[in-house]
Image (tube, rainbow, N blue to C red):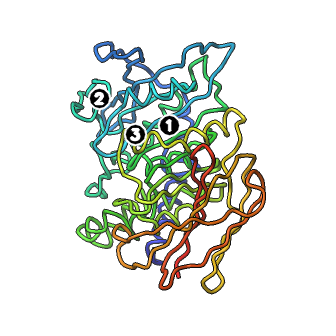
Amino acid sequence: MNRVAAFSVCLALAAFQWLYGGPVGPWDRAVLYQAPQLFEAAEFATNGVKTVFYEGEPSQGRPTRVFAYYGLPVGASPTDKVPGIVLIHGGGGSAFVRWVKLWNSRGYAAVSMDTCGAVSGNAYGEEQKGHRRHAWAGPPGWGGFDNYDDPITDQWTYHAVAAAVRGHSLLRALPEVDTSRIGVTGISWGGYLTCIVAAVDDRFAFAVPVYGCGFLGDNSAWLNVFQRITRVNAEKWLGLWDPSVYLPHAKMPFLWVTGSNDFAYPMDSLQKSYRALKAPSTLCVRLRMPHGHGAAGENPAEILAFADSMTRGARPLPVFTRAACEGRTARAAFNANGRKVAKAELNTTTHTGKWQERVWQAAPVTVNGNASADGTLEAELPEGTTVWFFNLFTDDGLCVSSQHEER
């Protein structure tokens, strides 16, 4: 981001705080932190989860409502409280009952809300195919790039973030939920929103953006959009809604889950995003990880392992403590945090240009030291390597990554 854009960001944040009194952005946390008013949605009942509308932010002077599914695991009670998770869908999605059920089966209370003024398709596993806008809808998604001149409180990101924070407040109001053990995860546009929501809502115990990140104006699938709406208007949108503005304010640990060739959120913008954080973060970058709802974005085992480490005292994921290159020799050090490291690999590419199109190669690397405690890696980079990073794999298949380095 250039100096003009950075200055615009600073002005936007200052204006937010002066106009709205909130510590991060234009949202009134004192309001959003209250349990939202609920409205009947019995006609959408399905698969043993609760269906509800809850109050959203006013749009164009009229009230709005947010559609959501929420549920509790078997055995949850006010005397045996459970952890919880807020689930934020991505582009083309809506509230997902199957996602709620998945986390309920893992022992978590869960809520999945629609962020685009729609109701779900209401068929288990087929929610993307039938969702439609309802009578109390706020702005449609996703991005709202052409609405940069609308009042801030009428724009999509403002409403979507508020919907997620209110969903968190709904979950916290359930007597069976331990309010100190609730996290948030989101897929694609939901990952983008997770980056902002985690900064706005400091009550979360952890955050897991899947694919989504910030610095969309530097590199993303939407560069052509920013060019179309002119530089001045692009900087206006980015100054209001790019996660890079908000990530430095997040206080909870992050896990970033993505693929090396993600079409929407490339690795250079991902790196700028996790480096913008002041909170601890862990990376899981798998080669050519597919992009999508369902198994691709919901089921990576690292998400549950990270959540359990944050809420149930389970062993943390391994962590890289150092990664650097001297000449063509790449070295790294790690702490396995009590997990058994089964193998490691060096990921390299000799390509330049679009991150989405780069071809990656993985080569096995010998793990030196105690595979359940401290260890080191060392490998020779192939001739012509332009980017490299290490991956560690535990004996139960979990993956953690070092930061990538460009040469």
381 sits to left or right of 42: right
Question: Which residue is pictured at 78% across the width and 53% down the height?
Answer: 373
User: For mark 2, does the 10 Å Cα neighbourhood hold few (<14), some (14 to 19), or many (20 or more) residues?
Assistant: many
Depth check: give the residue in front, 382 or 122.
Answer: 382
Depth check: give the residue in front, 216 or 304.
Answer: 304
> In this figure, which residue is indicated by the disc labeled 3?
295
Question: Can you say whether 97 is above or below 175 in the image?
Answer: below
Q: Position of residue 308 (x, y in %)?
A: 64, 36
Tell us which disc is closer to us: 2 or 1: 2
> In this figure, which residue is indicated by the disc labeled 1?
165
Label total for image: 3
Q: CA distance from mark 2 to mark 1?
A: 19 Å
Rendered image: mark on residue 201:
none
Residue 238 found in image quarter: bottom left
Q: Amino acid at mark 2?
A: Ser
SS state under label 3 = helix
- The numbered mark, 1 or 3, whose residue comes first in the sequence reads 1
Q: Amino acid at mark 1?
A: Val
Q: Amino acid at mark 3?
A: Ala
Q: Position of residue 99 (x, y in %)?
A: 42, 31
SS state under label 1 = helix
Tell us which disc is closer to us: 2 or 3: 3
116 sits to left or right of 160: left
SS state under label 2 = loop
Q: Position of residue 289 (x, y in %)?
A: 41, 54
> In this figure, which residue is indicated by the disc labeled 2?
120
Residue 133 found in image quarter: top left
